[in-house]
Amino acid sequence: MRHVAIIGGGVAGLTCAFYLKRRGIESTVFEAREKPGGRDGSVLYFLAPDLFRNTFQLIRDLELSGDVISITPHAGQLYRGRVYHHRVASATGLLAFKGLGITDKALLTRMAYLLSRYSSRLDFHHPERGLEFDNETVAAFVKRELSQNVLNYVAGPLISTLFFFGSEETSLWLYLVLAKHMYNTRMSTVRGGVGSLVDRLAGSSKVLPGQGVRDISAQSNGYVVNGRQFSDVVVAVPGDQVLRIGGIDALLSIADREFFRDCWYQRTVSVNVSTNDPVDRNCYAVSIPRVEGFSASTISFHDYIDPSAVPDGKGLLTITGGGPDVGSDKLLEELRAVYSVEPESVDIVEHPSGTPKFPPGRYRQIHEFNKRDRRPGLFFCGDYLLGPFVEAAVSTGVRAAQAIQG
């Protein structure tokens, strides 16, 4: 009888456990923290169902479809210290934005043309179809094909707001896929946030919280994890933590070990601020272009995204920044520079491995990693194998479960 060890109780590992159970395969999830979920609290909303298709299928399979909440896609953008609001559901949403000149706005039609031209090769779930776009940075492409201003106030903020790293270190492929779907934005969340998905997943699986994996070794008929015998192992920790698992080196090829050494993450810091009243009733989030000189990348408004998450009349927002030097005090100072805020309470969340980075060439490395043979019964899942979205965690968890079933 097969019994699978899943190392890591984040969204990817829990998704894998859920679908293994549906296929009649037993699994045990080892989670080092006292509570499963990983970085689930950082995910506030989902993009369109055609992009987040496995996430929405998971929602249906968990019987949570009735808890899906549509979000009206109004966003804010900081420009010279002031917030300007616009609708992001169409290509015309930015035409009224003061940070773009007439020439810049005219170039948006060129971007639409380029996306139409490349569309057939831009499939988030199959990056191997568009590896030709994995050869340069977003910054290099946008400056060449469009303008510096479009980079500053359109392309750059799209990357930094969602992923908290910069366009000068991000593969063009990731931006083109994202831009393709942002031209007709549909947004939603689940009542209670991604945490409600995690709670339902954890409740249906055997999870061992507070039990990190000390060591793993191979035997002729499977694996031994923390002294227990298993038929298969799924490694579902962030990519930069894989090589920290005792004994994993002996199970990996030189090429695989090099792959994980090249897996980089951005550190993120979020400050959750409760207020007596909503701070901005006009948008789900404010993006902060890097040219504004802030360490923060975005301010998200929970009371707009999911009103049920906040007591009646109250406000709840999160200001987030990424990088080695960002700190909570600085984020609060920047928040007050944008809005007049008197916090009722403040909660600080830091993720040393916040979001995986995808610089030029990374998708080629992922493609080669996925093609390589390795020891039978050893599998991997996590957002670092597809993209910095919860959809990537869910999708790779599904794929690992499918691979085990054969």
Image (cartoon, rainbow, N blue to C red):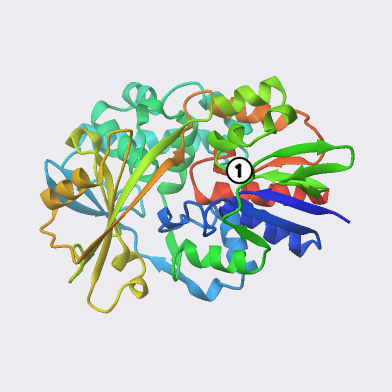
The one nearer the camera, 120 or 45, is 45
Is there any visible trace of residue 97 in the rendered image? no
Q: Secondary structure at mark 1?
A: loop
Residue on which the image places disc 1: 125
Work out whether 191 lies above or below 338: below
Residue 175 position within the rendered picture, expressed as x and y whole percent measured from the top left: 44, 36
Q: Residue at x 48, y 63 (%)?
A: 195
Residue drawn at point x = 28 percent, y = 48 percent = 298
Residue displayed at 29% across by 68% down: 303
Under mark 1, the amino acid is His
Count the labels in the image: 1
Answer yes or no: is residue 249 visible.
Answer: yes
Q: Quadrant of the N terminus?
A: bottom right
Q: Position of residue 267 (x, y in %)?
A: 38, 38
Give the camera-side residue of 135 and 87. 135
Quick one: label 1, few (<14), some, or many (20+) residues within 10 Å?
Answer: some
Left or right: 119 with respect to 191?
right
In depth, the one of 334 and 326 nearer the eye is 326
| Horizontal relation, residue 247 to residue 342: left or right | right
Q: Position of residue 251 (x, y in %)?
A: 74, 30
Question: Residue pushed farthest front?
Answer: 227
Where residue 292 sits in the image (x, y, percent)?
Answer: 18, 37
